Image (spheres, helix red, strand yellow):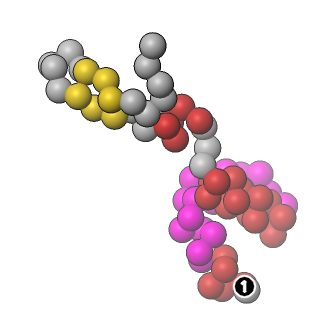
Amino acid sequence: MSEIGSAKKGSSGRSFTVGSSIKKGISFGTCLAIVISYTAWNSIPWAIFHGLLSWVYVIYYWAKYV
């Protein structure tokens, strides 16, 4: 059995590491951006867009409004 994030061999014989963030879902930065955006603008489409920007939006919001 292999663990999440362990090295695995590909079909070409080279080893690669599977990132655990892909298996765990959204990151903390994405979740934080969505929450900040929704509480500030009350808009789900903007929250999704800002979630895609992740830490970029969090830093922008902190620099502009805090």
Coordinates of residue 9 in the picture (x, y in percent): 25, 21
Give the residue displayed 64% in from the left and 54% down from the top: 28
Expressed as whole percent of the image width and height from the top left, the position of residue 6 reads 39, 30
Number of numbered discs present? 1
- Numbered disc 1: secondary structure: helix
Q: Name the residue nearer the viewer: 34 or 49.
A: 34
Compare residues 12 and 7 and report the one nearer the observer. Answer: 7
Q: Is residue 6 above or below residue 33?
A: above
Relative placement, left or right, of 8 versus 45 is left
**Quadrant of residue 39 in the image?**
bottom right
- Asked whether residue 55 is drawn in magenta, I would say yes
On the rendered structure, is 8 left or right of 44? left
For the point 61% across and 44% down, the residue is 26
Residue holding disc 1: 65
* Crowding at mark 1 (Cα within 10 Å: few <14, some 14-19, many 20+): few
Magenta range is 42-60
Residue 30 lies in magenta, yes or no? no
Residue 55 occupies quadrant: bottom right
Look at 60% across and 77% down and name the residue there. Answer: 60
The C terminus, quarter of image: bottom right
Task: Decide if residue 51 is in sight here.
Answer: no
Q: Is residue 10 among what the camera can see? A: yes
Which residue is found at the position 54% from the left and 31% from the top?
Answer: 23
Quadrant in which residue 43 is drawn: bottom right
Query: Is 45 located above or below residue 8 in the figure?
Result: below
Residue 21 on image: x %, y %: 52, 41
In the image, is 50 to the left or to the right of 47?
left
Which three-letter amino acid code belongs to the residue tagged 1? Tyr
Q: Quadrant of the N terminus?
A: top left
Dominant SS of magenta comes to helix
Judge whether 41 appears above or below 24 on screen: below
